[in-house]
Image (cartoon, rainbow, N blue to C red):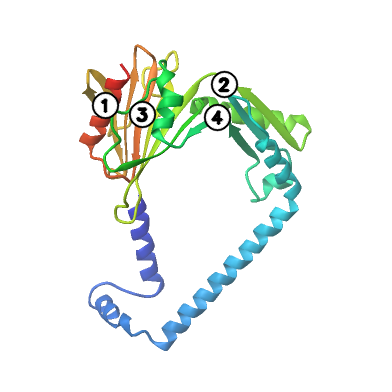
């Protein structure tokens, strides 16, 4: 999709400046190294207009922020107050003028979470004593360095969408400019984040390994839906779903442990791992979690 957009943009630019294809287009390309004074003038004028528009948009945005500064400050204060373990907090700005503007989102959230910056710290302080949702690796994924582990309350996307609508309705009915809703959630999810040790073509890939509780009636992993290109495979006696998207720029392996009712998802974005490497990583996690 990204490449298609780029090609469309390039084609659009060619039409805008009157460039053609075939011999005429080739001639234009050959002479592009020596631009005319008129061409330079157009470029300078276009740059000036762009800079002026950008400065004007920035000034308008700053003016809006000043107008709603009190509301935004109150929102940030409510979000920044200390959260209790398992707490999920929503803050809604109940102001029609603010909502009609582009100053910011009318609803924001904060979640209590625990972060570990090294894999050893994560294992020693959390994973070693957690038998309900085991997630450990015998070795780091090839070419990746550990970035962080994050443990936070878990809600499904459907539950989050429902709560959002509920907060908005309650906020509007409250009569308060700033409406705060606090929830306590016993379920947790674990996220291990790895980043590529070295860039590939100027891009640093990201690898995420997630474990989360499955719903009582779930038959597949709710947060990683099966798609047309998904494949059902078997790794270490466990059925897994492998899904590549956008020419392998995103790929995942997901499975549910039917005995423990725990979901596992490996997601790689713009990384270098092959399908075989992803499945091997899944096998390592399956072996360590049984």
Q: Position of residue 94 (x, y in %)?
A: 73, 38
Q: Position of residue 134 (x, y in %)?
A: 38, 20
> Residue 66 or 56: which is nearer the viewer?
66
Residue at image location 61% in from the left, 35% down from the top: 109
- Crowding at mark 2 (Cα within 10 Å: few <14, some 14-19, many 20+): some
> Residue 145 or 253: which is nearer the viewer?
145
| Residue for badge 1 | 284
| Mark earlier in primary sequence (1, 3) | 3
| Residue for badge 4 | 161
Disc 2 to disc 1, C-alpha distance = 30 Å
Q: Quadrant of the C terminus?
A: top left
Is 121 placed above or below 100 here? above
| Residue for badge 3 | 265
- Crowding at mark 4 (Cα within 10 Å: few <14, some 14-19, many 20+): few
| Mark earlier in primary sequence (2, 3) | 2
- Crowding at mark 1 (Cα within 10 Å: few <14, some 14-19, many 20+): some
Helix, strand or loop under label 2: loop
Quadrant of residue 90 in the image?
A: top right
Left or right side of 237 for 258: right
| Mark earlier in primary sequence (3, 4) | 4
| Residue for badge 2 | 185
Residue at image location 26% in from the left, 34% down from the top: 278
Disc 3 to disc 4, C-alpha distance = 21 Å
């Amino acid at each position: 999709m990204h490449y298609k957009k780029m090609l469309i943009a390039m084609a659009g630019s060619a039409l805008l400046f009157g460039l053609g294809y075939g011999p005429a287009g080739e001639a234009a390309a050959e002479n592009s190294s020596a631009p005319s004074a008129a061409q330079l003038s157009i470029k300078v004028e276009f740059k000036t207009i762009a800079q002026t528009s950008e400065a004007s948009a920035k000034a308008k945005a700053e003016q809006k922020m000043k107008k709603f500064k009190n509301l935004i400050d109150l929102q940030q204060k409510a979000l920044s107050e200390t959260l209790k373990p398992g707490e999920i907090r929503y803050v809604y700005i109940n102001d029609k003028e603010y909502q009609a503007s582009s100053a910011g989102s009318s609803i924001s959230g904060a979640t209590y979470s625990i972060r570990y910056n090294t894999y050893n710290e994560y294992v020693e302080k959390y994973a070693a004593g957690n038998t309900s949702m085991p997630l450990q690796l015998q070795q780091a994924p090839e070419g990746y360095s550990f970035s962080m582990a994050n443990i936070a309350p878990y809600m499904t996307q459907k539950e989050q969408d429902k709560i959002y609508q509920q907060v908005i309705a309650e906020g509007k009915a409250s009569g308060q400019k700033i409406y705060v809703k606090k929830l306590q959630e016993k379920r947790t999810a674990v996220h291990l984040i790895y980043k590529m040790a070295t860039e590939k073509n100027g891009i640093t890939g990201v690898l995420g390994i997630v474990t989360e509780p499955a719903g009582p009636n779930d038959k597949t992993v709710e947060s990683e839906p099966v798609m047309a290109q998904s494949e059902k495979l078997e790794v270490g006696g466990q059925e897994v779903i492998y899904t590549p998207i956008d020419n392998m720029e995103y790929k995942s392996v997901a499975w549910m442990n039917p005995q423990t009712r725990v979901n596992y998802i490996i997601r790689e974005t713009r990384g270098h791992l092959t399908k075989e490497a992803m499945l091997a990583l899944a096998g390592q996690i399956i072996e360590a979690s049984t």
